[in-house]
Image: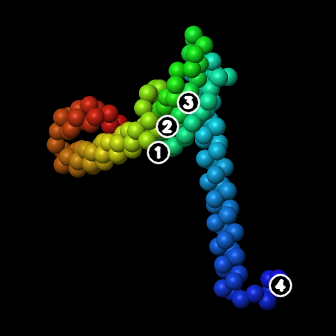
């Protein structure tokens, strides 16, 4: 195939195809790295890390669910559990192990992500209102206190 004799349309199709393959490879590389880092975080919390058998992994925002079954201190397998992980400062941290299905764990993550987005929006609007009131020379103490109680900056 002579590239110089190809039509512009064929060249563009090849370029798009190559770009898609490269983007997919980059995405999969990041996904595999994050899954591996999540597994390591779980292994650090287990009594018998060598016994771990991992199941499904799903990332939602800055959280993830990772199925795991491992031996307890008595040497018996505890059964499939979901490790609920949070990503903070670029590292995965296990926040809990839950005896729920993977589907339920992911559903819980999605609900938490939606709630956090709502609080974030409220904090942003609260900050905007405080700035407007300050410009008008008005008291903002009650709004600042409300923001702190929601966990706003």
Residue 59 vertical placement versus 23 (above, below): above
User: Which quadrant holds residue 40?
Assistant: top right
Question: Mark 4 to mark 1: distance in Å?
Answer: 45 Å
Task: Determine contact: label 2, label 1, CB under 8 Å.
Answer: yes
Q: Which residue is mark 4?
A: 2
Q: Which residue is mark 3?
A: 68
Q: Which residue is mark 2?
A: 65
Counting the numbered discs, the total is 4
Q: Is residue 15 left or right of residue 153?
A: right
Farthest residue, direction right = 2
Q: Secondary structure at mark 3?
A: strand
Q: Is residue 23 left or right of residue 143?
A: right
Q: Is residue 22 left or right of residue 127?
A: right
Q: Secondary structure at mark 4?
A: loop
User: Which quadrant holds residue 46?
Assistant: top right
Farthest residue, direction top = 74
User: Residue 60 has which mark?
Assistant: 1
Question: Mark 2 to mark 3: distance in Å?
Answer: 10 Å
Residue 55 vertical placement versus 28 (above, below): above
Crowding at dot 4, Cα within 10 Å, few <14 / some 14-19 / many 20+, comes out as: few
Question: Mark 2 to mark 1: distance in Å?
Answer: 8 Å
Task: Identify the mark nearer the N-term, 2 or 4.
Answer: 4
Q: Position of residue 34 (x, y in %)?
A: 60, 41
Question: Mark 3 to mark 4: distance in Å?
Answer: 52 Å
Residue in front for this viewpoint, 97 or 79: 79
What quarter of the picture does the C terminus occupy? top left
């Amino acid at each position: 195939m002579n590239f110089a004799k190809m039509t512009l349309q064929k060249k563009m199709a090849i370029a798009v195809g190559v770009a898609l393959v490269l983007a997919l490879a980059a995405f999969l590389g990041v996904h595999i790295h994050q899954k591996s880092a999540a597994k390591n975080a779980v292994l650090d919390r287990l009594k018998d890390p060598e016994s771990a058998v991992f199941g499904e992994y799903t990332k939602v925002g800055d959280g993830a669910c990772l199925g795991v079954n491992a031996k307890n201190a008595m040497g018996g397998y505890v059964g499939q559990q979901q490790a609920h992980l949070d990503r903070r400062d670029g590292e995965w941290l296990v926040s809990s192990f839950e005896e729920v299905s993977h589907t339920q764990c992911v559903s819980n993550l999605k609900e938490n992500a939606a709630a956090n987005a709502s609080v974030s929006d409220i904090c942003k609007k609260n900050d905007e209102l405080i700035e407007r009131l300050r410009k008008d020379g008005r008291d903002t103490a009650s709004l600042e206190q409300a923001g702190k109680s929601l966990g706003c900056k």
